[in-house]
Image: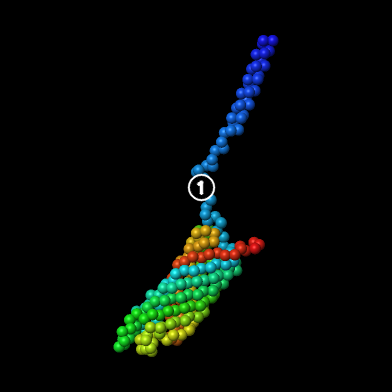
Amino acid sequence: MKGKGRIWLAVAALAAGLSMGAAAQDQVPTPPPNPQLPPPAPLAGVRYDYPWEIYGGFAYSHFDAGPNILQGANLGGFDARAVRELTTQWGIGANVRGYYGTSGVGATTALPIHGPFVSEHMFLAGPEFRALHDEHASMMLHAFVGGAYGDFQHSLRGIPPGELGFFANQVTFGGAFGGSIDLNRSPRLVFRIAPDATLTDFGGVGMKEQFALSVGIVYRMGHRFGTKK
């Protein structure tokens, strides 16, 4: 009996030990995620199938306010665009621009007129094409045409603009041909750099080409193509 009692005691002790070991194993905390794994890429969700892109930025233009003015005007202003994307590459855009600053004069006068204020507004529309793109950046090309209004007489104190080498205030053809480099900051938010060659025909002296540049922010709007609202 004594031998059997020792056997049963040993079996009970072994069972208790196994039970305690299993309980201790259940209480071991789950190890944290591997800190070496990189976080999700912030641009992994960038797509080009949003139906609208809205752009607003600061603008610069080198502008000649008259046919014979040697000192051009360096103007600052704004550039605003709305593009309706038809596919992931093609869209139709509307563009409004305003440029403001001062200009040199092309002739002398008895009045002390120096650096008179001039301005130009452009109202344009046309196609836009996305030539290259990935999750980081894209390159856009556009050809916008429409009208331009120039205000050259605001600060001439009643002197005929021709006497100072300026154009008269007028509406004429305007165009902007160029593109942009878009740097994605998130799936919807984009930083844009947009150089252009602008064309106008103030004074009927023939098309005159100017350089323009804008820098600003694009926001992609709406539901992606093929998704329900």
Q: Image quadrant for the C terminus?
A: bottom right
Residue 62 appears in view: no
Figure quadrant of residue 70: bottom left
Q: Is residue 146 left or right of residue 69?
A: right
Residue 168 percent coordinates (x, y): 42, 86
Residue 195 percent coordinates (x, y): 45, 70
Q: How many marks?
A: 1
On screen, residue 208 above or below 56: below
On screen, residue 221 above or below 168: above
Tell me which residue sits at (60%, 68%) in the image. Answer: 86
Task: Compare residues 207 and 15 and report the one nearer the observer.
Answer: 15
Q: Is residue 48 left or right of residue 62?
A: right
Tell me which residue sits at (48%, 63%) in the image. Answer: 191
Figure quadrant of residue 25: top right
Residue 221 percent coordinates (x, y): 57, 65
On screen, residue 2 above or below 75: above
According to the picture, the residue beneath numbered tag 1 turns out to be: 38
Residue 24 appears in view: yes
Tell me which residue sits at (30%, 88%) in the image. Answer: 110
Q: Amino acid at mark 1?
A: Pro
What is the image's colouring?
A: rainbow
Task: Compare residues 40 and 16 and report the one nearer the observer.
Answer: 16
Task: Compare residues 140 and 99 and report the one nearer the observer.
Answer: 99
Q: Image quadrant for the N terminus?
A: top right
SS at mark 1 in the image: loop
On screen, residue 9 above or below 18: above
Near mark 1 (Cα within 10 A), the count class, few <14, some 14-19 or many ≥20, is: few
Tell me which residue sits at (61%, 23%) in the image. Answer: 17
Residue 121 percent coordinates (x, y): 47, 78
